Amino acid sequence: MNARTLGILALAACVFAVLAIVGQSRNGAGSIAGDSAGTLFVPGLASDLDDVGRIVVTGAGRETLVTLERAGGEWSVTEQDGYAAAASEVNALLIALAEARIVEEKTADPAFHSRLGVEAVDAADAGGLEVALVTDGGARYEVILGDAYGGDERYARLADEARSVQIDRNPDVARDPADWVRPGIMAIAGSRVQRVEIAHADGERLVILKETRDAANFSVEDIPEGRELEFAGVANVTGNALQNLGLDAVRRAPDESAEPDESAEPVAVTEFRTFDGLVVTATATAADEGEPWLGFSARYDPGQAAAFATEPAGDLADPDEDAGPDVAAEAEALALRLAGWQYRIPSYQHDQITRRMEDLLAEPPAAGE
């Protein structure tokens, strides 16, 4: 191989190298020059984290999807009538953005941002999300979160910069406001419940109860003559209905001063009484667009607590405490949290709270048996 041939090969190698670099830049997949690897993606956010008072999630076409606001240390979801947000979800987002570090710089050419999902959300077909964090002092941080990279990383871009990057976090940002609300309505252990009364609008009344805390099953009052329960513990699911009560949707209760609305009329009122005096009332309204709503209230009944004061506390007792739980304070806090709201709950839980006698009974014997 002569010197001329070696020169040609060397030149060709250089050309191919240049073409590879240019091609990588043009397809948006490769990194660009920069020494930011390991640095914070959103500089300054960590020091401002405690002052963030508003978060706005914006999608394609610059549509506002979710607005989260903090007042008095509590987060709420504007699109859910200001209902309480799940603090764990909000905090997880804030921490992820504050701690995110750059793994690698990607394309700075806006023409290729869409390949990573980090194009401006002004576009009707934008694939990413813009997350704006606003502090009480007026500082504003805006980021575009694009496609995930693997399971734990993501492409992202500061909204006012052309440079896109790969970060070492993959923040979970729900697009549906309902996914941001606090998921649990209440959690009243079934072992505390002494009596449940369900009163239907048509006059039917169902009462289940326990005479003592250690009773295995709830008994059912006024079983029709000639009928029997489907099985001994058939009423227990109703007695336990409040122990993990979740929600599917929430809204402000209708204004009582507004025009009467037939859909707001109660169809069933269910009262739960605990051995220690907590009384929770669930009011089910008529179905609205195929789904019923429930409103809840809570109060403390000292007479109820006194009537069962001699009962052993069982699981309620804390061996490290001389006194039992402050049920009066619990009832007050619960009443404050529930007041003015209506909930849609999973259908099976709704059925448990609004059961009828026939739901508890075995099939009647056939004629002649």
Image (spheres, grey):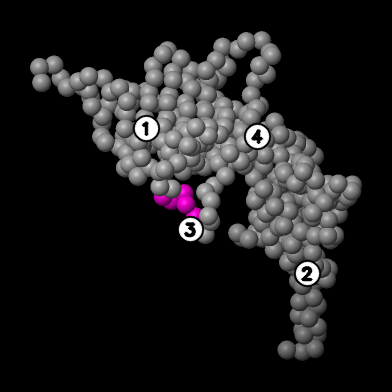
Q: Main secondary structure of the magenta part?
A: helix
Q: Amino acid at mark 2?
A: Ala
Q: Which residue is mark 4?
A: 336
Q: Nearer the viewer, mark 3 or mark 4?
A: 3
Write down the residue under mark 2: 37
Query: How far apart in space, not on screen, are marks 1 and 2 (Cα)?
Result: 65 Å
Q: Which residue does the numbered mark 3 point to in the structure image?
A: 319
Of badges 1 and 2, the one in the foreground is: 1
Q: Image quadrant for the N terminus?
A: bottom right
Q: CA distance from mark 2 to mark 4?
A: 49 Å
Q: Tell me the mark number nearer the camera, choosing from 2 and 4.
A: 4
Residue 82 pos. (x, y %): 71, 34
Q: Amino acid at mark 3?
A: Pro
Disc 3 to disc 4, C-alpha distance: 30 Å
Residue identified by numbered label 1: 209
Q: Secondary structure at mark 4?
A: helix
